[in-house]
Amino acid sequence: TLFPSTTLFRSPPIPGADRDDGAIRAATGNARRAGVLQAIQLGRQSASAIRRPGPANGWLITNPPYGKRIGVSDLRRLYSSFGRTLREEFSGWDLGILSPEPAWLEGMGLDFEEGPWLNNGGQHVQLLYTRVD
């Protein structure tokens, strides 16, 4: 395992969330197979309900829906709402986000820098990042 119980340094659990129970089950299975299940804390939660976990700034890494589970019009509303939540709750944080269509992120109201294109579960996506202000 990557995080044995005898580790001298213990970091707080890395939180993760999705509103879909199937996505949470899949992430739990992936974390178990990777040997990192004890280092994460997964729960059911919508993107608009996330809150800053404490006073310190950090990184928020997200792989939001790509429109397969919801339609593109709902996706635009989701991204707009998520951007508002990020600006209200995570000002000063760094954000990394995966998207197959970077133009969809324009509604978030954030200025992204382009990162590399990656393969994520068979989907060609780009990593974009920014500081939330």
Image (cartoon, rainbow, N blue to C red):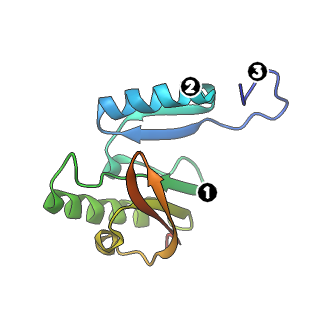
Q: Nearer the viewer, residue 111 or 55?
A: 111
The residue pinned by badge 2 equals 33
Q: Residue 99, relative to residue 50: is it above or below?
A: below
Going by the image, does 29 lie left or right of 84? right
Tell me which label, 2 or 1, sits earlier in the chain: 2
Q: Position of residue 131 (x, y in %)?
A: 54, 71
6 on left or right of 71: right
Q: Residues within 10 Å of mark 2 (few under 14, many from 20)?
A: few
Q: CA distance from mark 3 to mark 2?
A: 17 Å
* Disc on the earlier residue, 3 or 1: 3
Q: Nearer the viewer, mark 2 or mark 1?
A: 2
Tag 3: amino acid: Ser
Amino acid type, residue under disc 2 in the picture = Arg
Task: Give the residue number, with chain letter if any, for mark 3.
Answer: 5
Distance in Å between CA atoms under marks 2 and 1: 26 Å
Element carrying mark 2: helix
The local crowd at label 1, few if under 14, some if 14 to 19, many if 20 or more residues have their Cα within 10 Å, is some
Looking at the picture, tell me which residue is in the foreground, 49 or 68. Answer: 68
- Residue 10: x %, y % from top left: 75, 33
Residue drawn where x is 51% and y is 63% of the image: 95
